Image (tube, rainbow, N blue to C red):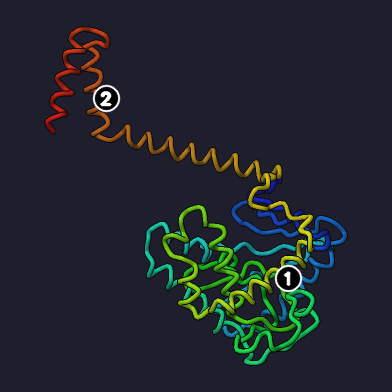
Amino acid sequence: MRPMDLLYAKYNRHRLPPFQIETSIWRDRDRKFVLKKALASDAVGHLQRLHEQAAPIRHSLHGDRLRLPEVTVIDEQTLRFDFVEGRSLDALLVSAFLEQDKARFLGIIADYLALLNSAFATVPVPVLTEAMRQVFGLASLAELDGLGPFLTPALVDLVFENIIVDGDRHYLIDHEWVFEGCLPVSFVLFRSLFYFYEKNEAFGLETWMPMSAVLDRFALSPETVRRYREMDEAFQAYVFGRERCYRYKDRYAKYAHSVPSLLETIEHQRQVLRDYHAKIMQMQASVGWQFVQKTGRLMETHFPTGTRRRRVLERILRRLLAFM
């Protein structure tokens, strides 16, 4: 029997123990699938809730504009998800940025916001649940005044990288964080923008398109952003702990690679080398390259390196180039 190929693995050991899971992508012949496993017995309940949450999310969806991959329970500690081919909204935004296309960049964000508002059942008035208090630090409904419409249930994972586009279909590939209650659609938009900008800060995204300008364009005022930052900080504390004792991914922390991650990186570098070699072979087959090679061989035959004739030829060539 042909063994399955491991393509990718990520271990969330930087979270608090009840939320530590492994996510891996496998290929069995020509079919890919995703496995999510609890890394310890403490996280089994979290994994089971992940499976249970699919039903209320599907119930909240309108039509088929946004879909969820099918999920299968393998055992108490393992879930299997169908793999979705396509490109994430995150990748599409990066592409627009690299091509310096501001209109397309803003259009993708606008389409994303329209998708959130049309694909889900929303409510105009929120419900304050115990989860909203514990997870997001909300003390009263007054803190959400004027911030509707609201998603129900409260989905936190609707960020750019978790929505895959395949033609005219959209898939939510991760719904790990779902809570009873309501969240503003604009809070989800804020989180998507905040973490997208944080991830791409080093590449000049902020200089090209300031985040403040994007927030303003989509009616996220400084006061709303401040409130959403506080809500997200409370959520991060819920996942990683108040002291962030499990969170190693700080800006100046040393990055830790798992063995599967290293294998994936090595394979990626091998593929880069294979692509580079293929380009070299393609270049060598070109007429221009063959001309350069023939010219070089003729020079070595009639003007050998180190000879007086070669030095005279090089002086002549330098003078000719100076007049060009």
Label drawn at residue 293 = 2
What type is the residue that disc 2 sits on? Gln
Label drawn at residue 234 = 1
Neighbour tally class for label 2: few under 14, some 14-19, many 20 plus, Cα within 10 Å:
few
Considering depth in this image, is 266 or 84 the residue closer to the camera?
266
Judging from the image, what secondary structure is the residue with disc 2 in?
Answer: helix
Image location (x, y in percent) of residue 243: 78, 59
Image location (x, y in percent) of residue 161: 57, 64
190 displayed left or right of 238: left
What type is the residue that disc 1 sits on? Ala
Image location (x, y in percent) of residue 115: 53, 79
The residue at 72%/51% (across/down) is 248
Label 1 close to label 2 by CB (< 8 Å)? no
Residue 53: quadrant of the picture: bottom right
Judging from the image, what secondary structure is the residue with disc 1 in?
Answer: helix
Considering depth in this image, is 135 or 284 the residue closer to the camera?
135
